[in-house]
Image (cartoon, helix red, strand yellow):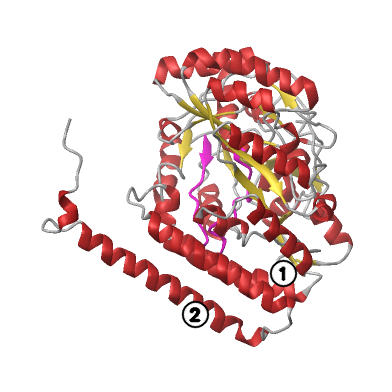
């Protein structure tokens, strides 16, 4: 039984999206298909997508009584004591032979997890498909093999045994991932065309997850097209999203592969999105991809400062950022951007440079994007190069020794103050506008979003200037946040009242409708 456990969004982390990369969403699907291909019976429990509570999840485990329970453990910005308590209790009932964790979080925290939770039998480190299949086989035939590569286990109360499994090079040899009914309820069907990245960004843990020196590995365009053909034929799906952290891959080879894939996808009449590095955004490739159905793209700009980009080891420049934005817009694509406004070494000058860059490139006209880029700090998670470096410098705040996320101090206390204030203000917006941003609320007021966007930008600019002039009293931070959120709430309430009046049956605007055709 492969378990996607229930997850809760922490209010103070409602827009912190990097607790696990998007590519992790197919870890369970690939693991399930590999287990089935090896002859094992597999049950996937979608505790998150099916909105199961812990009681319902426990009922599934008691009914299924699986030999092996593998939990895709996703970090929720806190230690999930409720989930761990549930699993510990079920383990005492003797419902299964073996319990293991897999995913990004356990890959980097396997020692703490195994030494803290004695009811946990093992942890899969890195790519889980083959390791879980070998584990299942060892349970079916205990005398059939010895050490399982990629599986961490306790040796005693203080030591853990572990050896890395080399990453799979031939991704075409993997069976297509198993997809549950719940995954088909998502707006787009997720597809993974490649794994890893040739970049070395300090804040990223994609490559450390797969193992040092693995780099970028790709499926062939023909293999990807065959999977999409099957989904279109069997499910009628027309919207897809490539969850690859780096869709294009390196250099001319990566561009040629993308062009070949576009050629195969164009006759299928589908729409798709992807994510890529700015230095891989080339005019001719984007043009062909758009003709094939590309409709959305996320690019990791990260900063408008060349100095900051060097600190992050992005291997890109501000000039490349701006060139990529221009290319995407010429082909009708609105770039969705990754951006880190506040990093541990940021100065107010860096923040000002970032703001100028965003304004110069017209990236602050949409409330959802503005709220993100004017707040986002660098998230420091285990496994990343920045985590290791800050740990070496003694700058990590590790209140809990088993913590997966670490805090740190800013070099500049003025930057720390600005980051803290903007985090509180933008979190208020995210919570107030969550229905609109997520698409759950079909009614969106463009006027309200424009108003809030203007307020947010004005507040950020004013506070930055005051800090630069040393005219802002840190003791006034709470009052500043409260005044800002009150002003935004008042604007939201005014817009709601105007909308209610405009939709009353006897209101003149209710007659301004397009006649039915």
Identify the mark at residue 399; answer none if there is no mark: 1
| Residue in the foreground of this view, choosing between 143 and 310 | 310
Q: Residue at x 69, y 52 (%)?
A: 113
Is 118 left or right of 426, judged from the image as shown?
right
Q: Nearer the viewer, residue 280 or 98?
A: 280
Q: Residue at x 73, y 52 (%)?
A: 303
Residue 371 located within the stretch drawn in magenta: no
Report whether residue 59 is seen.
Answer: yes
In the picture, the disc for residue 409 is: none
x, y percent for residue 60:
42, 40
- Sequence-first disc among 2 and 1: 1
Identify whether 169 is placed above or below 2.
above
Residue depicted at x 54% and y 34%: 332
Using the numbered discs, state the Cα–Cα distance from disc 2 to disc 1 in whole angstroms. Answer: 32 Å
What element does badge 2 sit on?
helix
Q: Considering only vertical position in the picture, is 505 above or below 333?
A: below
Q: Quadrant of the C terminus?
A: top left
Q: Is residue 158 visible?
A: no
Secondary-structure class at tag 1? loop
Q: Which mark is residue 483?
A: 2
Q: Is residue 342 left or right of residue 161?
A: left
Magenta segment range? Answer: 1-22
Residue 410, located in which quarter of the rendered image?
bottom right
């Amino acid at each position: 039984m492969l378990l996607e456990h229930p997850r809760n969004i922490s209010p103070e982390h409602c827009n912190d999206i990097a607790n696990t990369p998007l590519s992790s969403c197919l870890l369970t699907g690939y693991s399930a298909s590999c287990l089935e291909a090896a002859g094992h019976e597999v049950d996937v429990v979608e505790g998150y997508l099916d909105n199961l509570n812990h009681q319902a999840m426990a009922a599934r485990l008691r009914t299924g009584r699986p030999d092996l329970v593998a939990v895709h453990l996703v970090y929720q910005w806190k230690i999930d004591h409720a989930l761990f308590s549930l699993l510990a209790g079920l383990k005492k009932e003797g419902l299964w032979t073996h319990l293991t964790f897999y995913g990004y979080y356990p890959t980097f925290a396997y020692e703490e997890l195994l030494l803290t939770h004695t009811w946990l039998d093992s942890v899969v480190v890195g790519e889980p498909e083959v390791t879980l299949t070998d584990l299942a086989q060892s349970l079916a035939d205990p005398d059939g093999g010895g050490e399982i590569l990629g599986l961490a286990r306790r040796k005693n109360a203080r030591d853990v045994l572990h050896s890395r499994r080399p990453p799979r090079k031939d991704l075409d040899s993997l069976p297509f991932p198993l997809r549950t009914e719940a995954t088909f309820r998502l707006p787009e069907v997720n597809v993974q065309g490649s794994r890893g990245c040739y970049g070395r960004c300090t804040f990223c843990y994609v490559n450390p997850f797969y193992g040092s020196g693995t780099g970028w590995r790709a499926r062939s365009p023909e293999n990807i097209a065959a999977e999409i053909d099957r989904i279109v034929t069997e499910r009628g799906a027309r919207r897809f999203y490539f969850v690859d952290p780096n869709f294009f891959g390196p250099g001319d080879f990566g561009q040629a592969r993308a062009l070949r894939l576009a050629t195969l996808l164009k006759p299928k009449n589908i729409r798709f999105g992807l994510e890529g590095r700015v230095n891989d955004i080339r005019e001719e490739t984007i043009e062909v991809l758009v003709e094939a159905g590309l409709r959305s793209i996320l690019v990791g700009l990260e900063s408008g400062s060349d100095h900051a980009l060097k600190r992050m080891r992005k291997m890109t420049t501000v000039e490349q950022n701006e060139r990529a934005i221009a290319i995407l817009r010429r082909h009708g694509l609105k770039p969705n951007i990754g951006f880190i406004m506040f990093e541990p070494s940021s100065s107010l000058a860096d923040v000002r440079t970032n703001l100028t860059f965003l304004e110069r490139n017209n990236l602050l006209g949409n409330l959802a994007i503005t709220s993100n880029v004017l707040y986002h700090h660098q998230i420091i998670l285990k496994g990343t190069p920045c985590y290791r470096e800050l740990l070496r410098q003694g700058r990590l705040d590790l209140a809990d020794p088993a913590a997966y996320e670490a805090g740190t101090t800013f070099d500049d206390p003025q930057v720390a103050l600005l980051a803290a204030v903007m985090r509180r203000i933008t979190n208020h917006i995210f919570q107030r506008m969550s229905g609109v941003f997520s698409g759950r609320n079909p009614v969106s007021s463009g006027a309200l979003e424009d108003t809030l966007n203007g307020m947010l930008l004005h507040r950020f600019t004013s506070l930055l200037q005051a800090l630069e002039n040393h005219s802002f009293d840190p003791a006034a931070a709470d009052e500043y946040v409260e005044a800002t959120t009150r002003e935004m709430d008042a604007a939201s309430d005014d817009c709601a009242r105007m909308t209610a009046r405009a939709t009353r049956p006897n209101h003149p605007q209710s007659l301004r409708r397009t006649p039915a055709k």
